[in-house]
């Protein structure tokens, strides 16, 4: 029996079998080089295809989307029936997509409602007027997520990436609504999935309620630090908060759940940054003025191969629970595309794949070689522990984050790097009762800005504006320092997003 066999249950060793052979294959259901993609998948021994289907803003009717998703799944499973395909349900909705989908009778009935002859309603899904952020506390959004999930399950998909989950759960106190939806998806999968099981992740370090993780494993993009004393646009990776523990969906208490890293995409090359920023400024603008995969694709072939090798070894050594999802297929769309291609592809460039970036041999050697020989040198997982460990909100049972960082333009004046959401120098200390605090001395009067990064990432940040989490470096609060050598204390309450500023 294969190490990857499962049916209805998935012990951690089986889950890690797939995560240790993972790649992101974004929208592979639309690939014009699918035959060559499948060749690479088989050659490298890839068993988990992340982001294989999903929509951000759909460009085709939903029926056609699911039909093409099914066809791709059937072709891939014909080549290797063991492969897990992941679909995405993201943190964005658009009115034209919702309005074009009639709600199936089975979705109404799953929520205990009488069927209606209508489409999904955008205004009943969004977090606030004018936004595209869904609000999972709303029933309409819950129905939308469930509708998408059960259709992907029917198409042969056995995993879901739920995007930036801490954003659309902003009003979901205690994660009750997302917990309900996840339970419903798992319940449907138990009877209808290929192997009666689905696994779920999101961009999160921990989503634990009453000691139980809602997710099977946690997933995040990598974090970088630019290198200025080497020619070119070099960077190194930086370790951030660990994957949280808790009771897994399999009912096993884990000190830390598995963790999956990736090269993320969010806009490709920032043309404005490349035209208007200095070399040093651009070093700190995202990944040298790119998103992650566009930076990677913009490097020379030898540098890409070296960085893949570095990322794999870095993951094994710096996070003993971590795995790296190799970029098999990832979008590069932006103002300018790397080599003029809309997608990065791992494939060697050939007639069968003229837009390949030629990393398949390096990836194959690393995946076939495995993590274990490098894990022997791994730092112990305890080095990744931070304050507030295993503390829970007494009302909802929500696990508090182990790392909370104060970041912004003020950081250089206290000895840290500006806008470093992962800084240990400005890490807030857990003071009990779900609160974190940090005190520091600001030597110069003036106006600065700050945000609060939970888990030390830019995926779930908080400021004084509106109280909702946000993603990225924008949306921070003002920090007005009235005089030189001011003593500042900032306190943050996790469950309410309350922020208090005291200046002496």
Image (cartoon, rainbow, N blue to C red):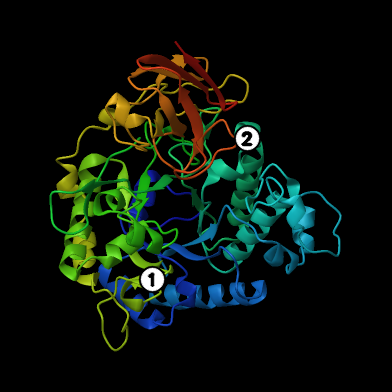
Q: Which residue is drawn at the image coordinates 54% and 45% (left, top)?
A: 165
Residue 300, percent from left and from top: 19, 68
Instruction: Tell me if residue 493 comes above or below residue 35 in the rendering.
Output: above
Instruction: Tell me if residue 155 comes above or below residue 161 in the rendering.
Output: below
The residue pinned by badge 2 equals 466
Determine whether, in the image, residue 224 is placed left or right of residue 159.
left
| Count of numbered marks | 2
Quadrant that contains the C terminus: top left
Label 1: few (<14), some or many (≥20) within 10 Å?
some
Question: Residues under labels 2 and 1: Cα distance?
Answer: 34 Å
Q: Nearer the viewer, residue 428 or 396?
A: 428
Secondary element under disc 1, as helix, strand or loop, is: loop
Q: Earlier in the sequence, mark 2 or mark 1?
A: 1
Secondary element under disc 2, as helix, strand or loop, is: loop
Instruction: Tell me if residue 25 comes above or below residue 422 in the rendering.
Output: below
Residue 219, percent from left and from top: 41, 47
Quadrant that contains the N terminus: bottom left
Does residue 83 show up?
Answer: yes
Q: Which residue is drawn at the image coordinates 36% and 63% (left, top)?
A: 47
The residue pinned by badge 1 equals 336
Residue 151, percent from left and from top: 63, 65
Q: Nearer the viewer, residue 101 or 421?
A: 421
Does residue 45 show up?
Answer: no
Q: Which residue is drawn at the image coordinates 39% and 22% (left, top)?
A: 445
* Res 440 → quadrant: top left
Determine whether, in the image, residue 315 is placed left or right of residue 267.
left
Residue 313, percent from left and from top: 19, 50
Q: Nearer the viewer, residue 447 or 162?
A: 447
Q: Which residue is drawn at the image coordinates 31% and 78% (left, top)?
A: 39
Q: Nearer the viewer, residue 154 or 319?
A: 319
The residue sitting at the bottom extreme is 351
């Amino acid at each position: 029996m294969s190490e990857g066999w499962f049916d209805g249950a998935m012990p951690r060793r089986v889950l890690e079998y797939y995560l240790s052979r993972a790649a992101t294959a974004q929208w592979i259901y639309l690939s014009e080089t699918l035959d060559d993609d499948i060749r690479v998948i088989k050659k490298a021994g890839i068993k988990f295809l992340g982001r294989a289907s999903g929509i951000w803003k759909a460009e085709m009717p939903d029926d056609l989307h699911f039909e093409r998703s099914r066809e791709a799944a059937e072709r891939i499973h014909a080549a290797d029936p063991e492969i897990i395909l992941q679909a995405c349900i993201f943190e964005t909705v658009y009115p034209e997509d919702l309005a074009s989908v009639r709600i199936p009778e089975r979705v109404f009935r799953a929520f205990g409602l009488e069927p209606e002859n209508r489409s999904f309603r955008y205004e009943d899904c969004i977090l606030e007027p004018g936004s595209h952020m869904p609000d999972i506390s709303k029933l309409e959004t819950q129905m939308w997520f469930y509708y998408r999930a059960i259709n992907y399950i029917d198409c042969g998909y056995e995993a879901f990436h739920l995007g930036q989950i801490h954003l659309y759960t902003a009003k979901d106190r205690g994660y009750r609504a997302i917990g309900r939806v996840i339970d419903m998806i798992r319940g449907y999968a138990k009877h209808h999935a290929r192997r009666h099981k689905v696994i779920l992740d999101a961009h999160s370090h921990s989503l634990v309620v009453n000691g139980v993780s809602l997710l099977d494993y946690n997933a995040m993009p990598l974090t970088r630090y630019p290198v200025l004393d080497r020619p070119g646009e070099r960077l190194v990776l930086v370790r951030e908060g660990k994957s949280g523990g808790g009771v897994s969906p399999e009912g096993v208490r884990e000190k830390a759940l598995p963790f999956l890293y990736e090269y993320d995409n969010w806009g490709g090359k920032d043309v404005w940054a490349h035209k208007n920023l200095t070399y040093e400024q651009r070093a700190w603008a995202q990944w040298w003025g790119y998103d992650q995969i566009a930076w990677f694709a913009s490097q020379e072939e030898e540098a890409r191969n070296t960085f893949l090798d570095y990322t794999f070894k870095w993951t094994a050594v710096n996070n003993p629970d971590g795995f790296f999802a190799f970029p098999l297929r990832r979008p590069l769309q932006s103002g300018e595309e790397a080599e003029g291609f809309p997608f990065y592809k791992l494939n060697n460039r050939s007639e069968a794949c003229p837009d390949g970036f030629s990393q398949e041999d390096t990836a194959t050697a690393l995946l076939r070689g495995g993590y274990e020989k490098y894990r022997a040198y791994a730092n112990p997982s305890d080095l990744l522990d931070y304050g507030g460990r295993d503390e829970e909100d007494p009302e909802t049972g929500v696990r508090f984050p182990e790392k909370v960082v104060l970041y912004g333009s003020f950081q250089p004046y206290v000895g840290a790097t500006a806008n470093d959401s992962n800084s240990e120098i400005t890490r807030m200390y857990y003071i009990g009762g779900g609160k974190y605090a940090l005190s520091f001395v600001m030597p110069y009067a003036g106006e600065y800005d700050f945000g609060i990064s939970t888990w030390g990432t830019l995926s779930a940040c908080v400021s004084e504006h509106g109280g909702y989490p946000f993603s990225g470096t924008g949306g921070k609060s003002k920090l007005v320092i009235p005089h030189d050598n001011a003593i500042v204390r900032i306190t943050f309450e996790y469950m309410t997003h309350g922020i208090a500023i005291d200046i002496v």
